[in-house]
Image (cartoon, coloured by chain):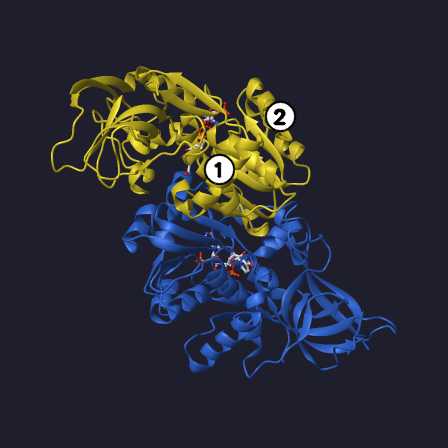
Chain colours: A yellow, B blue
């Protein structure tokens, strides 16, 4: 059987804020069968993850492109791989059968052909909605869990600051930190997000960074006794201000620097603070923390079942809406994990 | 007995490059006796250490001033404590006797009155010149040893870059790194220093950073396969360039940022590199690494005895020359550990 597969491509490299004009919805006919002897798996995509790092892959050049295999450069005109949940329609790989649910690197499109060796595994939903496996039980969750517990090495009672706190990773860091017994303040880009953090997610405090003019004083106000841990999702001035407010032996986990993805604008932390306060600033990728993967899944699914944690999701239907969902990440349109629903389960 | 003690004070706070006019040689009469009941120790200073961090103590404000007790603010008009070697002339403290050699926090002057609780211990020279105990076997040595082995966590064969490599700490980092089996490149501020590094200290390569216009390309040239460890003594553009050239899981030990002490000028490392290459940037103080102190002393004195390590010293005589010796640190006048000799042994 053959179908018409609709999928998203970039028309050019994207070196700045992404815009609709950078993207195109392509169509191509696709056989829903596998050639004899091939190990390919053909899947029907159900939900795909929309992530800021894809922008670094779209650039003419970014140091991200040599980091790890799923961050390689995106070639204009070609399909874009992305994390997501799908259903097998044909399989040349003995690990997968027709109708299996799978999770892994699929594509920003209606169907994906997954080659042998690419990241794909059978999915046991464990009674949770499939979207949870894209976000809270997927790479956003692992980034938050590994980043917070492994990179930040928290101690109970420590004071934690999280940026893009209502985002996919940020909201989970805040929830983990609260459950662990830390004092948690988050920042986000709207009044609505700030209220959500305080009222629904149990953050001790939250503020809208867009209302602030002097971030160093703002953080001083929220952390009169200093910050022990800063979980950085934005970089630039916020990182600079956080370092100025860090305590001795403070730790900064650099998960991402979204404010630097679009314009490359940077702000330098004061290295005198780094020396004299013996601060550690450490970049990490979720994929480096597979050693805590089973802990992460069991802890998080327990918290979800007992109602101690909540999944914050922001789902848009339709493959054609991937570009706008993606563009919206850089203007703060999303609240929680941004997912595009491609097809009914 | 009473003497006239000559000592150095600052006339004002120093917020920029230090100049002769910031300093004054004061005199005051001092009794070389201890009041009954007092625990004071009066010492005659022999050698005092001249260190860049003193500038941060002289500023109107610096975050260094709240870091650790010996980095507190220097009050204009008052004596300045500094590491050094001295001989006891009178003691109210049962741990010290007249004529004992001691090492610890004394003063930029001819005599010091050391209060109970201040850092001071009896010195066993172990057959080495007394100046070694100010530099290579003192805090410069501990900064190099603790910073390299504990903070950088080197592996044999790794590629190490050291800035201010002919300075007191830098030259030792290079020597430790070579002895440990790393590939070592240093930078320094003159042709003479560069030659010394390559010919006398065994660095694999060295360059004069003042001859370079594009530090990123320079480092790329010296490290075609990337830098694993950067031991940072200068901060700013050199830190930025090093981060751009770091390998995956690279480590930056921030020992000091001398180029930022005088003008506060900073340059921001690219945080995308920090994330995707999972770089760790960590500030430290020698005093945090007392856990390796006895290792440091035994390893270093063994290497000195076998001739595997060399002490690089730059000694000026005369208490009145402390200001110029100190000022010279910021224009690169010194080669190796800068020490002022105050009196004959
Ligand atoms: N290291 C890893 O393995 C890993 C894994 C996943 C994600 N990440 C990184 O983590 C960060 C968050 O990712 P996510 O998936 O959770 O995305 P997200 O936070 O759900 O979405 C992006 C959010 O960033 C904020 N933002 C956009 N432009 C900004 C700017 N110029 N300044 C400040 N905030 C801005 C917006 O929220 P506001 O309304 O609050 O501005 C937006 O909603 C990103 O930097 C991403 O690259 C890293
Ligand atoms: N963390 C700790 O516990 C600890 C302990 C000791 C020292 N330190 C720090 O380590 C660094 C080196 O200290 P040290 O005692 O070994 O001093 P040093 O290197 O012996 O003397 C300072 C040297 O810095 C270089 N320099 C001066 N201004 C510079 C500038 N604007 N840009 C680049 N280089 C400049 C000069 O050499 P060139 O000719 O090469 O320019 C000068 O000789 C300092 O940052 C210091 O604060 C930290």
Residue A95 point in image, percent of width and height: 26, 39
Residue A235 or residue B208, whichever sits in front: A235
Q: Is residue A31 left or right of residue B304?
A: left
Whether the residues at callouts 2 and 1 have beta carbons within 8 Å, the answer is: no
- The residue sitting at 64% across, 63% down in the picture is B82
Residue B344 point in image, percent of width and height: 63, 79
Q: Which mark is residue A198?
A: 2
**Quadrant of image for the N terminus of chain B:** bottom right
Residue B305 point in image, percent of width and height: 46, 82
Q: Residue furthest bottom?
A: B127
Q: Chain of mark 1?
A: A
Q: Which mark is residue A228?
A: none
Against B252, residue A21 (above or below) is above
Residue A78 point in image, percent of width and height: 21, 27
Residue that numbered label 1 is attached to: A144
Residue A9 or residue A124, whichever sits in front: A124
Q: Is residue A213 left or right of residue A263?
A: right
- Name the element at disc 1: helix
- The residue sitting at 64% across, 77% down in the picture is B123
């Amino acid at each position: 059987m053959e179908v018409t597969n609709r999928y998203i491509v970039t028309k050019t490299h994207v070196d700045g804020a992404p815009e609709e004009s950078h993207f195109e919805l392509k169509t191509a006919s696709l056989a829903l069968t596998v050639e004899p002897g091939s190990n390919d798996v053909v899947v029907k995509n159900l939900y795909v993850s929309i992530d800021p790092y894809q922008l670094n892959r779209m650039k003419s050049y970014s140091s991200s492109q040599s980091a790890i295999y799923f961050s390689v450069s995106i070639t204009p005109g070609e399909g874009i791989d992305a994390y997501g949940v799908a259903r097998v329609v044909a399989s040349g790989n003995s690990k997968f059968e027709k109708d299996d649910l799978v999770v892994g690197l699929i594509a920003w499109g209606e169907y994906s052909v997954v080659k042998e060796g690419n990241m794909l595994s059978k999915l046991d939903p464990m009674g949770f909605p499939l979207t949870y496996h894209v976000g809270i039980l997927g790479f956003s969750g692992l980034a938050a869990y590994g980043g917070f517990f492994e990179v930040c090495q928290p101690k109970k009672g420590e004071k934690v600051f999280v940026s893009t706190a209502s985002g996919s990773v940020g909201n989970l860091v805040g929830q983990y930190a609260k459950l662990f017994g830390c004092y948690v303040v988050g920042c986000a880009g709207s009044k609505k997000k700030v209220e959500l953090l305080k009222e629904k997610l149990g953050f001790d405090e939250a503020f809208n960074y867009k209302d602030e003019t002097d971030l160093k004083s703002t953080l001083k106000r929220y952390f009169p006794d200093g910050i022990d841990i800063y979980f950085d999702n934005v970089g630039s001035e916020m990182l600079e201000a956080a370092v100025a407010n860090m305590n001795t032996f403070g730790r900064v986990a650099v998960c991402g620097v979204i404010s630097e993805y679009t314009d490359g604008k940077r702000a330098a932390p004061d290295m005198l603070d780094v020396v004299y306060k013996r601060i550690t600033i450490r970049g990490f990728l979720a994929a480096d923390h597979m050693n805590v993967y089973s802990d992460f899944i069991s802890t998080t699914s327990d918290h979800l079942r007992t109602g101690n944690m909540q999944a914050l999701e922001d789902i848009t239907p339709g493959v054609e809406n991937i570009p706008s969902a993606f563009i919206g990440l850089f203007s703060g349109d999303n609240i929680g994990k941004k997912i595009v629903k491609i097809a009914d389960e």
